[in-house]
């Protein structure tokens, strides 16, 4: 299991463990917090506990684009000398420059007061669960929608996030300024360490550690480092001073199963697939699928997919030799929980309706030539498999007086998509029976027989997920391509399987023959074959095939009565 990796440069470090508790209202709060004690500063450089707020920006989840101008919420009425405008952490991450803004500071006092955001020695520890509850409360979110100009239903529809950034109102060099954690880090770099030198704890410990992510989102990693102690500017810019609210109506998505009913043929190797989605599946949070059918269970593990996408999961199995109705249960474990689906399968026998024995006195005076049928034909298919890989993101954590610090991997899972495909080609040839004494080339008299051979070829770049083309069934014009048919026999195995007529029980010589009716009119005679049961995770490949011979006369013309010799 891939986890954050830390390389320590001291013998032992004790870290406090932060419990992740989900809160559900109109959204999920992806944030946690910490802090520590801090000095009271000086008359020129100080912070008064409670002088704080939160910057809120609406972000499009897919593209990470800010879609509204940020708003600053606070319970106070601060007299700010200068700030850095209304710029979100996302915009700074994307390269926006820090700019001092001496215009009147814009803020909103919300109707529902903010909970404490930044911990302090005098007021105590901020309650992260209260902060989560506040920013996922429907009335608060409705208010934010109105303040940012977003339609509420659009905001909570799942395509957008709220990016939260704690703000501190600091006295710096005798002047009250408003800064987010990211702005404090950028301003300190602009001043070559001048802000950190006089306000190390509030601006670089309690402010950035008041919010950080529990799980990666919007391109920002989860924070797995210490929850107290002064943090570096690079740590703050990359990982601290932010929370995210995701919107959905229900608890975390459970994997969903899209299932389809199948009809299979007896004694046939098939691929049964389901589509799994919901949440994200990776090596840290894997999904597995168990298929149960015919008294056996098949487990498919390591079914991975990124958030917002899906993955096919499948098994390869052989149907029973007898026709029957079957039920397959499919259970998904992992992700947000356990889901279960049911497939109803009908296994049929195509070898139950061969043509009857033709007789010499058969007639069909009302026969009309039928139109050659066409069944479903799919000659190629494609599917894909998500392959996760770990994107390392090493961050240096500065130590305190007792240690030298350490590196910690705050990486995340990325996904590559491996693409697979399969294609089917085939050819059908019929030839006159060599026992037909007057046949020439592809012409013969009615009443005699002919043979058929179907050659197939399957090509694929994932052979474990594709079967050969296993069944071919031939229909005949004398039966209007209905009522009777012949299931051809598999003559070999593999992706170059061939099919021929089974031995005809009515043939004197046990030939692999179909006899044409003696009444069939002169002209073209065209059997039709449906080649099927080449299975892939994306469904069945099949082809329509036909070939013709010419009927000219009937076998009675080959008979004559010899005159009786005189005695």
Image: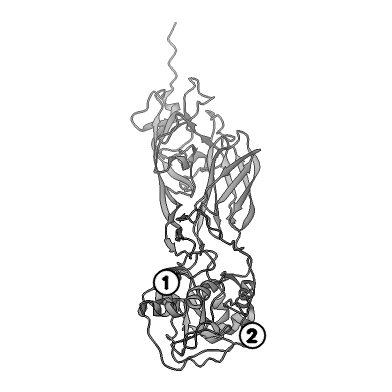
Identify the mark nearer the N-term, 2 or 1: 2
List x then y, in percent, for residue 322.
63, 34
Question: Which residue in the rendered view is the most extreme toward the left?
Answer: 441
Query: How many circles with numbers are drawn on the protein?
Result: 2
Label 2 packing within 10 angstroms: few (<14), some (14-19), many (20+)? few
Label 1 packing within 10 angstroms: few (<14), some (14-19), many (20+)? many
Quarter of the image where one finds residue 293: top right
| Residue 152's disc number | none
Asked whether the viewer can see residue 326, the reply is yes
Label 2, label 1: how many angstroms apart (C-alpha)? 33 Å
Badge 1 is on which residue? Answer: 233
2 vs 1, front mark? 1
Q: Which residue is found at the position 63% from the left and 52% from the top? A: 341
Looking at the picture, does residue 223 appear above or below residue 264? Answer: below
Q: Are marks 2 and 1 in contact (CB under 8 Å)?
A: no
Looking at the picture, does residue 111 appear above or below residue 543? Answer: below
List x then y, in percent, for residue 469.
46, 39
List x then y, in percent, for residue 73.
55, 85
Asked whether the viewer can see residue 530, the reply is no
Quarter of the image that includes the C terminus: top left
Front residue of 176 and 111: 176
Name the secondary structure under disc 2: loop
Front residue of 494 and 530: 494
Q: Which residue is found at the position 53% from the left and 35% from the top? A: 363
Front residue of 1 and 83: 83
List x then y, in percent, for residue 299.
58, 43
Name the secondary structure under disc 1: helix
Front residue of 531 and 244: 244
Looking at the picture, does residue 566 appear above or below residue 222? Answer: above
Looking at the picture, does residue 69 appear above or below residue 299? Answer: below
Badge 2 is on which residue? Answer: 112
């Amino acid at each position: 299991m891939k986890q954050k990796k830390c390389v320590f440069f001291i013998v032992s470090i004790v870290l406090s463990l932060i419990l992740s508790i989900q809160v559900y209202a109109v959204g999920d709060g992806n944030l946690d917090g910490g802090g520590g004690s801090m000095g009271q500063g000086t008359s020129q450089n100080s912070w008064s506990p409670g002088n704080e707020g939160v910057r809120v920006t609406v972000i499009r989840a897919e593209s990470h684009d800010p879609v509204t101008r940020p708003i600053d919420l606070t319970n106070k009425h601060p007299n700010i000398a200068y700030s850095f405008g209304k710029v979100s952490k996302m915009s700074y991450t994307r390269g926006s420059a820090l700019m001092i803004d001496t215009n009147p500071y814009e803020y909103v006092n919300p109707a529902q007061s903010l909970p404490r955001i930044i911990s302090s020695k005098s007021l105590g520890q901020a309650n992260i669960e209260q902060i989560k509850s506040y920013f996922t409360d429907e009335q608060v979110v409705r208010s934010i929608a109105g303040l940012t100009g977003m339609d509420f239903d659009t905001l909570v529809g799942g395509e957008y996030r709220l990016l939260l950034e704690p703000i501190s109102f600091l006295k710096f060099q005798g002047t009250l300024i408003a800064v987010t954690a990211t702005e404090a880090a950028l301003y300190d770099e602009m001043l070559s360490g001048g802000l950190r030198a006089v306000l190390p704890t509030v601006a670089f410990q309690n402010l950035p550690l008041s919010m950080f992510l529990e799980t990666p989102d919007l391109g920002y990693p989860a924070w797995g480092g210490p929850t107290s102690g002064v943090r570096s500017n690079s740590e703050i810019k990359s990982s601290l001073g932010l929370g995210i609210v995701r919107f959905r109506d229900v608890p975390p998505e459970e994997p969903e199963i899209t299932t389809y009913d199948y009809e299979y043929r007896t004694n046939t190797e098939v691929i049964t697939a389901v589509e799994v989605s919901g949440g994200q599946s990776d090596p840290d949070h894997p999904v597995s699928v168990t298929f149960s059918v015919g008294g056996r269970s098949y487990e498919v593990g390591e079914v991975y997919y990124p958030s917002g996408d899906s993955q096919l999961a499948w098994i390869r199995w052989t149907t029973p030799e007898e026709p029957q109705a079957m039920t397959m249960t499919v259970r998904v474990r992992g992700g947000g929980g356990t889901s279960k689906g049911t497939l109803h399968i009908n296994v049929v026998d195509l070898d139950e309706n061969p043509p009857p024995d033709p007789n010499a006195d058969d007639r069909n005076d009302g026969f009309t030539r039928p139109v050659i049928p066409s069944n479903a034909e799919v000659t190629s298919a494609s599917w894909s498999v998500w392959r996760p890989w770990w994107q390392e993101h090493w961050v240096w954590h500065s130590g305190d007086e007792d240690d030298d610090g350490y590196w910690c991997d705050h990486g995340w899972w990325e996904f590559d998509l491996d693409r697979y495909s399969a294609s089917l080609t085939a050819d059908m040839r019929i030839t006159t029976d060599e026992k037909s004494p007057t046949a020439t080339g592809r012409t013969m008299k009615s009443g005699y027989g002919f043979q058929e051979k179907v050659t197939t070829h399957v090509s694929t770049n994932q052979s474990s997920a594709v079967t050969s083309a296993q069944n071919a069934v031939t229909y005949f014009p004398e039966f209007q391509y209905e009522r009777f048919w012949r299931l051809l026999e598999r003559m070999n195995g593999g992706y170059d399987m061939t099919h021929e007529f089974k031995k005809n029980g009515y043939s004197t010589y046990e030939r692999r023959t179909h006899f044409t009716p003696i009444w069939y009119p002169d002209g073209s005679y065209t059997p039709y074959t449906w080649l099927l049961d080449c299975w892939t995770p994306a469904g069945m490949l099949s082809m329509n095939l036909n070939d013709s011979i010419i009927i000219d006369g009937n076998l009675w013309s080959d008979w004559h009565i010899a005159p009786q010799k005189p005695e």
